[in-house]
Every structure is written in C-alpha cells, then in structure tokens.
Amino acid sequence: MKPLLLFPAVLCFSLPALASNWPQTRGPNRDSVSTDATVPTAWSEQENLKWKLGLPGAGASSPIVWGGKVFVTCFSGQKEDGDVSALVRHVLCIDKVTGQKLWQKDYPTTQQDDEWRGMIREHGYTSNTPVTDGAHVYVHWGKGGVVALDMDGKEVWKAPTGSESGRQRWGSSGSPVLWKNLLIVNAADEAQSVIAFDKATGRQVWKQTAGLLEGAFSSPQILKRADGREDLLFAAPSELWGMNPETGKLRWYAPTGIEGNVAPDPVVQGEDIYVFGGFPSTMRVALKAGDKGEVSASSMLWQDSQSTYVPTPLYHDGKLYVVSDQGFAWCADAKTGEMIYRERLGGAADPSAGGGGRRGGGKPFYASPLLIGDKIYAVSRKQGTYILAAKPQFQVLGTNVLVGDTTDFNATPAVSDGCLFLRSNKALYCIGK
C-alpha cells in the first residue's frame, strides 16, 4: 500500500551517517530515553503528520530505525473462530523520509500457533520488537522462530526456537537483545528457555531451560558493571537472574517475591535494578545487583505492591515514572520506593481495547512511556498520546489523538531525528515538524 504523504519530502535528518538510530526496543540503550527535544508535542491528522502508511496486519511490536529505514512487523490471516492455519507474519522496511514501503517479507505459519482466543487477542503474534546492528535485522516471534534479514530484505538465516505453548496460551512478547556476536532471545513461551544464537550464522550457541520461565514475558537486559563485567538480566516469576551472556550460565539470582507473570523489563540505573510485574497481584522491587549465588537480604532496597503489569517504567532524575496498564500515571522515588503521585490519566478504560477478557480487555495502556527531552510521552491504546511533565508534580501538558484510527495502539513508539514513529493495528505514522 502506498503511503499517504502529508508533508513535502523534507529530510528528517541531515546525512544517513549522522542519522539517529533507534535500533531496538525502548531505544539505543533500552532505557526509554531520547534526548531529541525537537519531537512535536502536538499533532493530529492535520498537524505535524509527515506521512502515514497502511500496514498489512496488526501488531504490538515497536518500529525500529536505522539510517534512512524504518522496520516494523505485523501479522494477518487469523480468523474470528480462532483458526490460525492461514496466519502470516510480515516484516516491512519503510523509507524514513517518504513513508514509501521499500520491501516486505511474508512468513506463513509452519507451527501450530495458539488459537486466536483469549489473552493472545490482546497483542497477537508479532509482539517481539526486532533488533538491528545496521547490517542485519533480527526478528523473533515466538513459535515463528528467529529470522535474520539483511537491510535489503534478503534472508540470511532462520532458526526455530520451540513449538510448545505456555499453559495460559498467551503467546510470546519479549524482545531480543544483541550482545557482541550473539542474538539472545526470550523463548520462555515456546520452549521455557533463553537461547543465544550466533548472529552471523544462526547457530545455537547456548540454551538455558527452566520451568520457572513459565510466565516470563519480559525482554532481557544487559547490565554493565562497574568493573567492566557484563551480566545478562532476565526477570522471571519470583526471581531476577544475572547470567553470563557468553555462556548462559547463572552467575547470581535474587528472589523478588513477584509471583505470576512478569512482563515489564527490568529497569537499570548503575547497579541498582528495579523489577516490576506480577499477576493477579503486582509488585515492584528494588535491589542491588549480585555477584555470585543468591543475593543477600541486605541487597534488597525496597518493595511495594503498587506496580505495573505490562508497561515498563522509565528512570529519570532519581524518580521512576510509568503509566500503568490500569491507566494510572505514577511517579515514585527510586531510592526509597515512596509513591510521589498516582493519578488517573484520561477517562475510564475503553472496554473495546484488546479482546482478552477480564485479564486484558479494557486495559487502557500497553505501551511503555518514553522520556523525550524533558517530557514524557505515554501512548494509550484508544485515547491518544499523553504528554506529561517529567517532574515529580503531576501535570498533563497535552493529548494528541489520531481520530481516524480507532484500532489499538499497543506499541511503544520509536524516536529518530525529530520524528516520532507511532504504530497502531492498522497503520504506521511519522510525526514530525
């Protein structure tokens, strides 16, 4: 589908070599932070909308950006009676300036994917955000396995990650991370495993399997230690793991008390780690990174029961900010855990958001908030994007709604060169001046 070009094709960046990249989930550092203060704070179909491109299907994965290209995944072919035998997953590459689709790769299902029923209707079959190193784009989508494509859409390799289903049949969502020569994926849903592949060949380098991974939906993080060591952080139900990313071996672990599903990513600030999640009751926990074996009780900094189930909070200036899936914007002191404010954002939850029943339907926020300059951008599923002041006083600076799109906006946006890339279940938007 050709894009609707709503503004002359003015360069959104100066030179490809200088273009700001957004290569993975939640940004270059996986911390939901952009220093780009030129992103608009107001937009609509008539204002600051550079282009819009219709997508071949829905999806909860975030767009990523490298140079002059935007990449996004989506899915189609599911039927309302639950049948997914015709399911197709798609990878698209779009010109960042014009919104023209450069190429599309389609991957019909080869596994027995979970039926289109219950909670999986909340997010679908392409919820894992791709990652790129500028030479290849790596896509993981649960039972669809992993595929590596070059920047022109040529398949370099693909590999399976598993064919099982979690007992809840909620599907896969954690996004892969690159570390040196490895692509590391959360294959908890389809294999109760964390798996590392050689990013050049697709050869499996290591695989760690544990029953505790049932219900682990978050993305792995890399923790850079003060002594130069790097740990792979992985949040599982009731525990946080610090793994050796080279071998997958467990270096240390910390009991968190967060039972049930863990969907938000761990938030890292220095060697302080903040963990969120839980179902049906949520928790948030702060702790010091461990070294070897079980983390001591003295390393636990604080814990609290008011948390978030889906969106990942962000750290800014000693505070933790999030808009939870329940629709509350809150700010907490990162040092003590004390709640500074907790305010309802927007109106009551729209019961048409998602389709997963009581566990998911009606949750107004799935996307994680971003800190862009000195403002927080929080994308709701049905009620637009809220702009909040990034300070410990609750202040809504504006709300932006694309009224012509009534589908869910489930994905955290991407930021690059003054542009905000938003995706819904039917379109990709470039917001820019």
Image: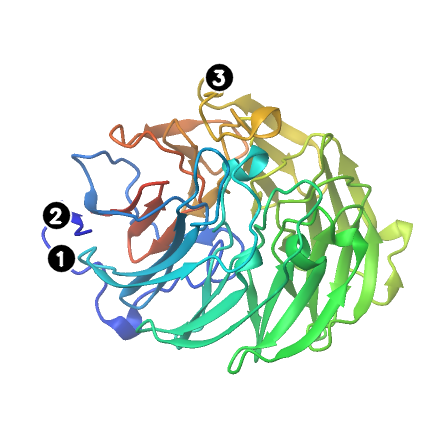
Tell me whether the residue at label 3 lies in contact with that at label 2, contact meaning CB atoms closer than 8 angstroms.
no
Callout 3 amino acid: Ala
Q: Viewed as shown, does residue 151 lie left or right of 363?
A: left
Callout 2 amino acid: Phe
Vertical arrangement, residue 164 with respect to residue 147, above or below: above
Q: Disc 1 to disc 3, how far (Cα)? A: 39 Å
Q: Secondary structure at mark 1?
A: loop
Displayed quadrant of residue 185: bottom right
In this figure, which residue is indicated by the disc labeled 3? Answer: 348
Residue 425 visible in rendering: yes
Vertical arrangement, residue 421 with respect to residue 44, above or below: below
In this figure, which residue is indicated by the disc labeled 1? Answer: 10
Tell me the mark number nearer the camera, choosing from 1 and 3: 3
In this figure, which residue is indicated by the disc labeled 2? Answer: 7
Q: Disc 2 to disc 1, how far (Cα)? A: 8 Å
Q: Which mark is residue 165?
A: none
